[in-house]
Amino acid sequence: GLLVGDVSGKGVPAALSMAQVLAEFRMHAVRGKSPLEVVRALNRSQCRRSQ
């Protein structure tokens, strides 16, 4: 899989958020989920965190 995220110049909060997304991505990917399932799970998590 390939995950691209650009947080350059966006500060510490953006870097921490990207670290969370990357950790979650790895967690879901190693469990053998399909790419669609991984993206859906990441989207749900980000939506919950942004509320």
Image (cartoon, helix red, strand yellow):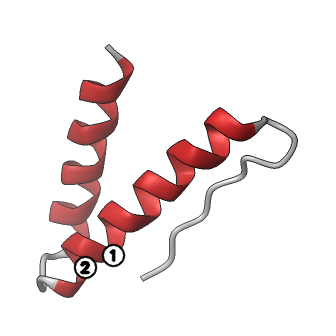
Q: Quadrant of the C terminus?
A: top left
Give the side of residue 15 with respect to residue 16, left or right. Answer: right
Q: Residue at x 38, y 21 (%)?
A: 50
Q: Which mark is residue 7?
A: none
Please say if 34 is above or below 36. below
Dot 1 alpha-carbon crowd within 10 angstroms: few under 14, some 14 to 19, many 20 or more: few
Q: Nearer the viewer, residue 42 or 11?
A: 11
Circle 2 — which element?
A: helix
CB-based contact (under 8 Å), mark 1 and mark 2: yes
Q: Residue at x 43, y 53 (%)?
A: 20
Location of mark 1 (residue)? 26
Residue 45: % across, % down:
25, 40
Please say if 7 is above or below 26. above
Residue 16: % across, % down:
57, 46
Alpha carbon distance from label 1 to label 2: 5 Å
| Kind of residue at disc 1 | Arg
| Kind of residue at disc 2 | Ala
Residue 25: % across, % down:
34, 67
Dot 2 alpha-carbon crowd within 10 angstroms: few under 14, some 14 to 19, many 20 or more: some
Give the side of residue 4 with respect to residue 32, left or right. Answer: right
Q: Nearer the viewer, residue 12 or 38?
A: 12
Q: Residue at x 87, y 41 (%)?
A: 9
Circle 1 — which element?
A: helix
User: Which image quadrant for residue 10?
Assistant: top right
Location of mark 2 (residue)? 29
Q: Residue at x 32, y 27 (%)?
A: 49
Q: Nearer the viewer, residue 25 or 2?
A: 25
Residue 18: % across, % down:
55, 51
Give the side of residue 51 with respect to residue 2, left or right. Answer: left
Q: Quadrant of the N terminus?
A: bottom left
Residue that lies at the very extreme toward the right in this rendered image: 9
How many labels, in total? Answer: 2
